[in-house]
Image (cartoon, helix red, strand yellow):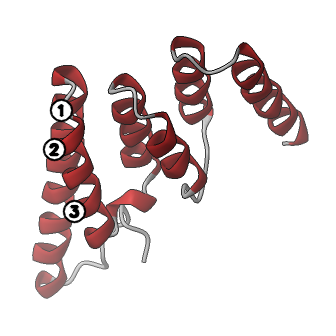
Amino acid sequence: MDFMTPPSFDPSNIDVWKYRMSMYLKTLGLLCSCTGLRFLSTGSQVHGAAIKLGLDLDVSVSNSLLTMYGECGSISECWKAFHSMPDYDQISWNSMIGMLAKSEESPDRSIGGFLRYDAMRMET
């Protein structure tokens, strides 16, 4: 069952779906707060909790992780989160390219990221 797909209408399953949805929204809110406050340690703990709950497989949560790690300057963790994503979207690529452009990494890496994104976009 996909995380965001509600279960068939069964009163015994709806509470589970409500719980998962509330955890999803709380995780996104916490990651957004950690990003704004640059709380890398707390954001990493939220990441661990998201993994345990299976929320890290959702593209929105993964994109929030990329943004949080990028804004906090943790390039290696940002790359790990990016490579563990099951799916990438335009926001994922923009987050990575923006993070590389702002970081002290070589300009070749940010240009390389853009070129990989462009090549992937052309394939679809």
Location of residue 102 with respect to 5 vertically, above or below = above
Q: Which residue is mark 2?
A: 42
Q: Nearer the viewer, residue 12 or 22?
A: 22
For residue 71, side relative to residue 23 (left or right):
right
Query: Is the residue marked by circle 1 packed among few (<14), some (14-19), or many (20+) residues within 10 Å?
Result: some
* CA distance separating discs 3 and 1: 15 Å
Location of residue 52 with respect to 24 vertically, above or below = below
* CA distance separating discs 2 and 1: 6 Å
Q: Quadrant of residue 3?
A: bottom left
**Marked residue nearer the N-terminal end (2 or 3):** 2
> Do labels 2 and 1 touch, CB within 8 Å?
yes
Q: Position of residue 35 (x, y in %)?
A: 25, 27
For residue 117, side relative to residue 6 (left or right):
right
Foreground disc of the pair 3, 1: 1
For residue 109, side relative to residue 6 (left or right):
right
Q: Which residue is mark 1?
A: 39
Q: Amino acid at mark 3?
A: Ala
Query: Is the residue marked by circle 3 packed among few (<14), some (14-19), or many (20+) residues within 10 Å?
Result: some
Dot 1: element:
loop
Q: Which mark is residue 49?
A: 3
Q: Position of residue 40 (x, y in %)?
A: 24, 37
Q: Nearer the viewer, residue 22 or 8?
A: 22
**Marked residue nearer the N-terminal end (3 or 1):** 1
Dot 3: element:
helix
Query: Is the residue marked by circle 2 packed among few (<14), some (14-19), or many (20+) residues within 10 Å?
Result: some
Q: Residue at x 55, y 58 (%)?
A: 84
Q: Amino acid at mark 1?
A: Phe
Q: Residue at x 55, y 43 (%)?
A: 79
> Do labels 3 and 1 touch, CB within 8 Å?
no
